[in-house]
């Protein structure tokens, strides 16, 4: 299933606001309000777009992941 334009935009903004050291990931209120206005929607709807987009991305990645046996036998390139 393809991401909608709204899901894609919300996920991109969410990724740009990602803080690796933060326990909880949350869009700043100002950013959420700006993207909601740009998409002509509410901040509550943004959460739904993000959840739906994450679900679609997860399903896409899991569907294309190699079987566990291949992963276990793969040599690491890390040193």
Image: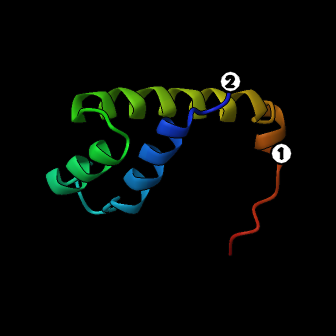
- Front residue of 75/18: it is 18
Q: Where is residue 52 in the image (x, y as percent from the top left)?
A: 46, 26
Quarter of the image for the C terminus: give it.
bottom right
For the point 83% across and 45% down, which residue is it? 73
For disc 2, the neighbor class at 10 Å (few under 14, some 14 to 19, many from 20) is few
Residue lying at the far left of the rendered structure: 29
- Front residue of 38/7: it is 38
In the rendered view, tell whether residue 53 sits above or below residue 77: above
The circle on residue 1 is: 2
Q: Earlier in the sequence, mark 2 or mark 1?
A: 2
In the rendered view, tell whether residue 13 sits above or below residue 21: above
Distance, label 2 to label 1, CA atoms, is 30 Å
Q: How many labels does the image show?
A: 2
Quick check: can you spot residue 24? no
For disc 1, the neighbor class at 10 Å (few under 14, some 14 to 19, many from 20) is few
Q: What element carries label 2?
A: loop
Q: Position of residue 59 (x, y in %)?
A: 63, 26
Q: Residue 1: name its quadrant.
A: top right
Quick check: can you spot residue 40? yes
Which residue position holds label 1? Answer: 73
Q: Where is residue 25 in the image (x, y as percent from the top left)?
A: 27, 48
């Amino acid at each position: 299933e393809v991401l909608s334009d709204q899901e894609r935009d919300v996920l991109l903004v969410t990724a740009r606001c990602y803080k690796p050291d933060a326990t909880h990931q949350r869009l700043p209120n100002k950013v959420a309000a700006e993207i909601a206005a740009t998409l002509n929607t509410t901040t509550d709807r943004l959460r739904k777009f993000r959840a739906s987009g994450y679900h679609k991305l997860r399903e896409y990645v899991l569907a294309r992941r190699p079987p566990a046996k291949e992963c276990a036998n793969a040599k690491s390139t890390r040193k």
